[in-house]
Image: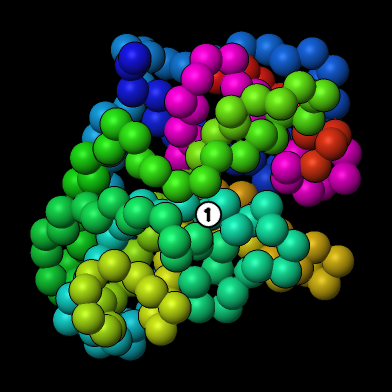
Amino acid sequence: MTRALLPVLLFALLSATTLHAQEAATFIADDGGVTTIVGEYFPSTPSFRDAGSQPVVFMGDISNIFVDGAFDFSTENLNLDSPQALAFTQGDIRTEPIQYTLPLPINPGGVLTDVDNDSNADPGVGVYTINFTFNGIGSPFVDAREYIAYSSITYSRDFATLYQINGGKMLVFAPADGQGFSSGFGADGELFTVDDPIVTL
């Protein structure tokens, strides 16, 4: 089985179109899935650079987004019972960006959710974000006593859609072929609802 951890970019200004049939997702130079993610973090708030001395970049399961009322101000939609994949970091955040390299696990663990909005029961997909924080307590893994400083997705601050995803990037793990996933926002402007356009991974 090839590695099927795929990056998905969400466009907040995507046109509201409903597709009733799943189309195959389009990937550029797809050779079996992404194996490594390389990037950098450089907080724009100067005082934040003094918030800690041990920066941590990790991939976390955000399956709590599918649980009503599960959003937490500190850990957002992170499922703390799922594994977290740590990145290798380089640099001094007080003077330069933190560069990171994240080797992706073949199977990242976490909760699989069927989000294709059809009537069939499917294995589903795992949904993850790349997050930045400082190690505050104990191990470098984030627990309920800690917080996420920056996430690769953004949340709405409007009252009607408060704390719903409105943009950013996420990773999707599809352990089986033919899994459907939202390719954007439907007419209701919300993600993971019945009017989302769906593509097949």
Q: Residue at x 49, y 71 (%)?
A: 75
Q: Is residue 174 found inside the magenta-colored segment of the image?
A: yes
Colour style of the rendered protein structure: rainbow
**Mark 1, secondary structure of its residue:** loop
Q: Which residue is mark 1?
A: 62
| Residue 139 figure quarter | bottom left
Q: Position of residue 198 (x, y in %)?
A: 71, 25
Q: Main secondary structure of the magenta part?
A: loop
- Most foreground residue, 45 or 138: 138
Magenta stretch in the rendered image: 169-192
Is 162 situated above or below 100?
below
- Most foreground residue, 51 or 201: 201
Placement of the C terminus among the 4 image quadrants: top right
Q: Position of residue 11 (x, y in %)?
A: 63, 40
Disc count in the image? 1
Q: Residue at x 22, y 81 (%)?
A: 138
- Most foreground residue, 37 or 93: 37
Is 155 situated above or below 182?
below
Q: Position of residue 2 (x, y in %)?
A: 33, 16
Amino acid type of the residue that numbered disc 1 sits on in the rendered structure? Ile
* Crowd rating for badge 1 (residues with CA inside 10 Å; few <14, some 14–19, many 20+): many
| Residue 98 figure quarter | bottom left
Q: Is residue 142 found inside the magenta-colored segment of the image?
A: no
Is 58 situated above or below 177?
below
| Residue 187 figure quarter | top right
Q: Position of residue 152 (x, y in %)?
A: 46, 54
Q: Is residue 130 left or right of residue 78?
A: left
Q: Residue at x 68, y 12 (%)?
A: 23
Tell me if residue 25 can be seen. Answer: no
Q: Residue at x 28, y 60 (%)?
A: 57
